[in-house]
């Protein structure tokens, strides 16, 4: 039997990149998956098609997780489609880098609304459904420990998410619900290509500082999410797991 047979998962921001890879990996282990998207319905539909063609179960559900009503509707879609909810992966995120002189209210609000508020709203909506043994996985970032220059707002949101993980692990522990952070290093995705990171001097420098000597791939991240979602991680909560090839 697969590790997640009979489980139901919501993965936010799953139309591409790390979220898409996690959704596919959870489904491959037997979970029924709600593939959330904010704007790319075509991307989410492609993820659902890949899952169903491989014999899995999935449905695409649109929604802006930073809006309470839409976060609630996303969670309810899992229950209405699959009857319950066991796993929440808070993957939705935005990032834009720049010096402190470029700080704006819009930059701050957008990052914190999606990266932090969104995770809290989805988790809040999920609480009435998650059973004992439920798993919440917050997708953070290695930046919260590396603290690179020109990332102050993005890094602040990911540091906040690490703190949220610690608090909720203690708060939800008595209900036997586990909460962990999975923090990737630099990963090749549509976003890192669009942001001109791949192939840049920054890319070259980061690879040079990575003990395993290469950039990460989404397939490096997704199996760790499967582990955290599964009973293999039944004694793991409140942890921040950096998946970066050793980059610190």
Image (cartoon, helix red, strand yellow):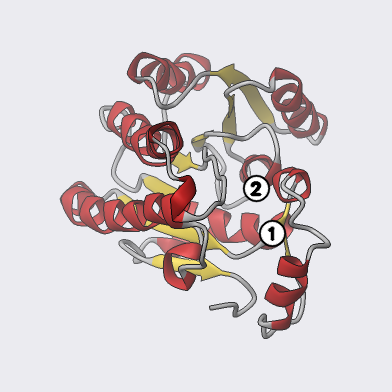
Instruction: Look at 46% across and 37% down and name the residue there.
Output: 107
Q: Which residue is mark 1?
A: 187
Q: Vertical placement of 248 versus 192: above or below? A: below
Q: Quick check: marks 1 and 2 in contact, CB under 8 Å?
A: yes
Q: Estimate the x, y position of residue 225 in percent, counting from the top left.
A: 55, 54
Q: Estimate the x, y position of residue 164 in percent, counting from the top left.
A: 28, 51
Q: Estimate the x, y position of residue 155 in percent, counting from the top left.
A: 44, 57
Q: Residues within 10 Å of mark 1 (few under 14, many from 20)?
A: many
Q: Estimate the x, y position of residue 69 in percent, counting from the top left.
A: 36, 14
Q: Which residue is mark 2?
A: 18
Horizontal side of 34 relative to 67 (left or right) equals: right
Q: Nearer the viewer, residue 45 or 98?
A: 98
Q: Is residue 213 visible?
A: yes
Instruction: Look at 50% across and 61% down and name the residue there.
Output: 183
Horizontal side of 166 relative to 55 (left or right) equals: left
Which image quadrant is residue 14 in?
top right
Q: Vertical placement of 52 versus 144: above or below? A: above
């Amino acid at each position: 039997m697969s590790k997640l047979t009979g489980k139901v998962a919501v993965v936010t921001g799953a139309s591409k990149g790390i979220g898409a890879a996690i959704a596919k990996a959870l489904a491959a282990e037997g979970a029924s998956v709600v593939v959330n998207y904010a704007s790319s319905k075509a991307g989410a539909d492609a993820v659902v098609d890949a899952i169903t063609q491989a014999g899995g179960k999935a449905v695409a559900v649109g929604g802006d997780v930073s809006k309470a009503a839409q976060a609630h509707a996303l969670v309810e879609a899992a229950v209405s489609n699959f009857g319950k909810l066991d796993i929440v992966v808070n993957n939705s995120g935005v990032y834009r880098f720049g010096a402190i002189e470029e700080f704006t209210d819009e930059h701050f609000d957008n990052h914190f609304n999606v990266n932090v508020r969104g995770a809290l709203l989805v988790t809040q909506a999920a609480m009435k459904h998650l059973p004992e043994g439920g798993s919440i996985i917050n997708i953070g970032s290695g930046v919260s420990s590396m603290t690179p220059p020109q990332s102050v707002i993005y890094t602040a949101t990911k540091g906040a998410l690490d703190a949220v993980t610690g608090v909720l692990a203690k708060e939800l522990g008595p209900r036997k619900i586990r909460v962990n952070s999975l923090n990737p290093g630099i990963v090749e995705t549509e976003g890192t290509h669009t942001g001109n990171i791949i192939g840049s001097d920054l890319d070259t420098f980061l690879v040079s500082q990575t003990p395993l000597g290469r950039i990460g791939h989404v397939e490096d991240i997704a199996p760790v999410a499967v582990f955290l979602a599964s009973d293999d991680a039944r004694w793991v909560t409140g942890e921040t797991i950096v998946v970066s090839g050793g980059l610190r």
